[in-house]
Image: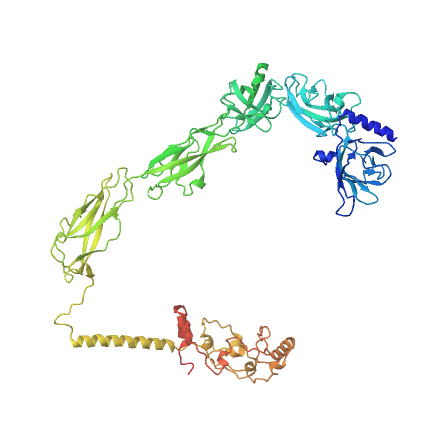
Amino acid sequence: MSTYYCLSLFIWTYMFHAVDATPLGEKASSDLLGKRVVDLTKDDSKMLHRTKRGWMWNQFFLLEEYTGTDTQYVGKLHTDQDKGDGNLKYILTGDGAGSLFVIDENTGDIHAAKKLDREEKSLYILRAKAIDRKTGRQVEPESEFIIKIHDINDNEPKFTKDLYTASVPEMSGVGTPVIQVTATDADDANYGNSAKVVYSILQGQPYFSVDPESGIIKTALPDMSRENREQYQVVIQAKDMGGQMGGLSGTTTVNITLTDVNNNPPRFPQSTYQFNSPESVPLGTHLGRIKANDPDVGENAEMEYSIAEGDGADMFDVITDKDTQEGIITVKQNLDFENKMLYTLRVDASNTHPDPRFLHLGPFKDTAVVKISVEDIDEPPVFSKLYYLIEVDEDVKEGSIIGQVTAYDPDAMNNLIKYSIDRHTDMDRIFSIHSENGSIFTLKPLDRESSPWHNITITATEINNSKQSSHIPVFIRILDINDHAPEFAMYYETFVCENAKPGQLIQTVSVMDKDDPPRGHKFFFEPVPEFPLNPNFTIVDNKDNTAGIMTRKDGYSRNKMSTYLLPILIFDNDYPIQSSTGTLTIRVCACDNQGNMQSCNAEALVLSAGLSTGALIAILLCVIILLVLVVLFAALKRQRKKEPLIISKDDVRDNIVTYNDEGGGEEDTQAFDIGTLRNPEAREDSKLRRDVMPETIFQIRRTVPLWENIDVQDFIHRRLKENDSDPSAPPYDSLATYAYEGNDSIADSLSSLESLTADCNQDYDYLSDWGPRFKKLADMYGGDDSDRD
């Protein structure tokens, strides 16, 4: 067995021309023949001799993937110092020493203990030593050597992807590259053909081919159509050993898609389309959809529709729906059944992105005929105008016709029409309309100054069908008539200084006019005809719609005349001329030297004669007498005696007493004792009325105190029994009402009815501070009256 492996090693060494048998670790010729210095004696007097020694072995090679049962022989280490007597010991270190590679320490034979894979590691670097067993010293220096692993074809080609995806435009020529696939082989490319890969196609013919060396897939058929077939699956094989028999191979799959090009024009599935439309449809209404088919996809299938010709090209329009690629027929103008009942259109559908390479196939558009029938319906009346503008003078008489509207029935029936005014637009009922002929007339006077415009709505309705009606706005403009006289623009407070000089301007006045003449306002100022020449002031027309008031004399006196009235005649220049008289009040005032007003009040002049002392005394006495009369009148009014409540002398129990006396409130102590209404103890005393004299004095029977009666029901029964047995009680058909609220509350009474029973008087002086609304209460309760005395 050892001889067999040595022979194999020799053959491989010869094939690769391995002639270098020196250790790799040595760098000089001295390393080829190891020189060793031997210590002959331990004494310094002994001579040292140099002896020529060296390693002896061949370069080692080993095949991968050994499948034998024994270990694989690698080679033999040997030195010329080995005499074969077993005195030397060989030691191996480095890559895989002891695990992958083992050495016979006596003979130097090296074996591989395991199967090796070149793809994992292609060479191993080891170091060898030879040691004298007796002395333990190295007889040769440590040296390196390499064990190379030779490749065998044990790896098949592998593609970089298990699945490739590619695309190529349809209608491509033969040889158009599609995609390149790549396969790699892990074997040694420098050793034989183990890593030489050749590509071939196993599936996908005759549509595609592959270059055997580069792996580029190309088209093999011309003008392949996506519309016929879009997806292709191609299987590519990569085989080593140059594709020869016995080589290993691998495969991959390539999915190829034909992409679309615009090589198909649109085509309508039918040549004629029919649609119906009522004549009253609004503009822009969609009447229907048409669609041309294009087998292309994406932007190659995009198309646009247009009306080529026809008698309805100006009545209808077609728009393109980008989402569905449909043409939508719409109404462009109002339809009228009475004018035309049928329209014929020619609609084109053309591609928006034609491909110049395929224009030779023909025009990329198609044409269809669209017929539209107009249906007759009952339409509302139609006015002759979109709106009406009427201008009328504001002085027009009531009942005058100011304009007319006209409407007609567009249907063939030509129904009669009646007119009316929408009263929501004429709340004041200023206008009216003739229901038959549409004449508009006034019902009330017009006034431009209050309402210069009136906007009303007229309704036209078919008499036979009230649901068919139309509305139209009518704008009525009121034209101005000069019917207002000019007047002062504001109230003027005019004064003149006592020391004024002639020709001094004291006031500039302006006027206003509610009218609006077309040529603008022009006003004139003159003195009134009754006083054409005023001796005190002069009116100067400034010719700019203003007038100046000038003084005419030297100095004015407040003692003689404190106020002057100056009438001014104002008129305009429109037709008819309107005029008015404005009166300017001029006060005489005291001024300083600069003309600034100081005082306009009339000062009291002390005359030399004056008033006599007797006259002053008489005036003072008159004032005193008047004051005394007022005080007496007030006192008498407060002390006026009140009339008795009951006029009749008959018993109160037999009469219904009617009186109209509001009473004096809590302060009135002349009538009933108010305290008895809420105080049971006071009621037990049976006090008599103090305003009338009783005719008969009945014996008052003492009853049980009310505070002992806890039960209300028991209280009522006792009172009922007392009234039945009391001869002085009211008749049996009378109703006795008790308002007893109880007297066991911890809180005192909150009612003011018991205020008279209190010992102290209440203070009502604060009522006078509450203002004039409480003056009456303050007079009643605030002062001391005779009743309290």
**Which quadrant would residue 677 be assigned to in this image?**
bottom right
In the image, 214 versus 521, the foreground residue is: 214
Quadrant where the C terminus lies?
Answer: bottom left
499 over 346 or under it: above or below: below
Q: Compared to 632, does 69 lie above or below?
A: above
Query: Foreground residue, 121 or 259?
Result: 121
The percent position of residue 717, horizontal first and vertical second, equals 64, 77
Image-based side of 45 in relation to 577, left or right: right
The answer to whether one can see residue 245 in this image is yes
Q: Position of residue 664 (x, y in %)?
A: 44, 75
Identify which residue, 703 or 411, lies in the foreground. Answer: 411
Return the x and y of residue 324 as percentages of the image width and height. Answer: 60, 27
The x, y position of residue 256, in whole percent, is 68, 24
Apparent side of residue 82 relative to residue 163 in the rendered image (left or right):
right
Residue displayed at 42% across by 74% down: 766
Image vertical order of residue 742 relative to residue 297, above or below: below
| Residue 447 position by quadrant | top left
Quadrant location, the N terminus: top right
In the image, taking residue 700 as reference, residue 8 lies left or right, namely right
